[in-house]
Image (cartoon, rainbow, N blue to C red):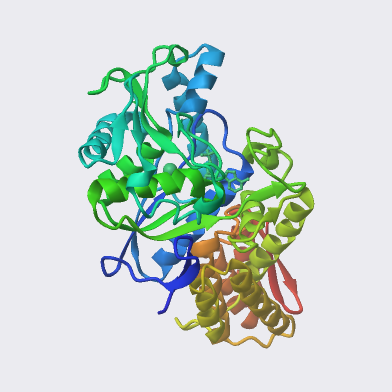
Amino acid sequence: MKIQFYNTLTRKKETFIPITDGKVSMYTCGPTVYNRAHIGNFRTFMFEDILKRFLMLVGYEVKHVMNITDVDDKTIKKANNENISLKDLTNKYTRIFMEDLETLKILPAEIFPIATEHIDNMVDMTNSLIEKGHAYVTDDGSVYFSIKTYKEYGQLANLDFDNQIQTERVATDEYTKENPKDFVLWKSWKEEDGKIAWDSPWGKGRPGWHIECSAMSTRYLGDHFDIHCGGVDNIFPHHENENAQSRCSSGTPFVNVWMHCEHLNLEDEKMSKTLGNVFSVPSLIEKGYTPESIRFALISSHYRTKIAFSEKKLTESKKAVHRINEMYNRLKTLKRSGTSLPNEYDDFIAALGNDLNTPKALGILFSYIKAINKKMDICSISENETAESIHFIENADKIFSLLNGSERIPEKISVMILKREEARKNKDWQLSDQIREEIKKEGWVVEDASDGPKCYKV
Ligand code: AMP
Ligand code: ZN
């Protein structure tokens, strides 16, 4: 099948062809673990989850690497402010991050490399950049990348050099697109770093943020891989710099497709730890929103459009999730046969294959649900259609994961309901009552209605 993704580097949709047939190598920038990740961060991680699940569903073997940034300007500052070790701080927030990923049913990466366990790889890459003339050492023992040595610098972020004053170098990890500068690969030790330092050929110091991802992606995915993702704020300077470092150190292409997710906003402002306008996963769960409704709220907009986040959006999402679960459970009480998928499923997959158009795919799914519900209401659904509908919902759920574990009728109960329906058809009321009791013992209630049995969790 033809898959197209929008590539930030070329600013157009391109047909996706993996480097190795049947396999996809994918690197996604992970969290900086100095704080609990907020729902804006999880928008980006959710987009990456949908992308990965889609590629898996259409048959690719995906190798997904997500780094954990446990040393940078922000982590050091927070550890020092709180007077705890960097390791204690970052271990705590890494653990919390993993818990939140699990709550939101985001599939774990195959590898979660931790930056401080890869300092050697970062030093090696920095060395190779010095040897190749792309980096230089300053008097204080820091190392900088010289952006003028890479003529394609600025291509990813689409920098307009004509209207910029390119000044000195920059030692901080973050700065704006308005003034690109030589950026730091290795930072010499400063008093504010306290005990946080590693030895290097240039003296005591620590890596810059950007080299961390270049070194870790190369270590696990090689010099050249398929997809690199992040939020749009990662484009500059982080990904621009990663691209420059990796391409200059290896001399080969680096990433085939760069994909970036737009921001989740709260009242027109980017949700960010710095601004403090954040919602965490547990705070939303405490308010009574399920992981599935949070998932829906994050995936019902296309990944390249902004999301205006609100509790109203979550309440609407809850209703949509309920409709899917209700329809699925209804189907599971009916007799079915066959293994095929409906034609609508092809449209659903095609929508996702067209730059991961989740709103369109969900639209197709909901129109289908509406049509099938109508058929069920008048008891005119065939066994084949029932089976097709179940397969469609279950396949869609491999990507969206909106079926709610606790509400979803398990296969065992579904089989018991069908047996009971058979008994009722044969007017074997004793057997039918006996099965109803057995179903009850399993924690489910079955009621008979004119359009078929209804089954609920007690
Ligand atoms: P950080 O922990 O700040 O490095 O961010 C982790 C990921 O979340 C990065 O890919 C960011 O681009 C992304 N991100 C940060 N804020 C938002 C937001 N408000 N909406 C969507 N993605 C975001
Ligand atoms: Zn990164």
Query: With 335 as the anchor, is 216 left or right in this view?
Result: left
Q: Quadrant of residue 335?
A: bottom right
Is residue 35 depicted above or below 26 in this figure? above
Relative side of 130 to 2, left or right: left
- Residue ID at (58%, 67%): 358
**Dividing the image into 4 quarters, which one contains the N terminus?**
bottom left
Asked if residue 54 is positioned above or below residue 295 in the image, the reply reads below
Q: Residue at x 52, y 53 (%)?
A: 162
Q: Nearer the viewer, residue 430 or 132?
A: 132
Q: Is residue 439 in sight in this rendering?
A: yes
User: Residue 188 placed where, x, y %?
Assistant: 36, 20
Quadrant observed for ligand 1 in the rendered image = top right
The residue nearer to you, when weighing 202 against 400, is 202
- Residue 336 higher or lower than 258, as above or below: below
State the count of labels.
0
Q: In x, y percent, where is residue 395?
A: 49, 70
Where is residue 67 shown, x and y percent of the image? 40, 41
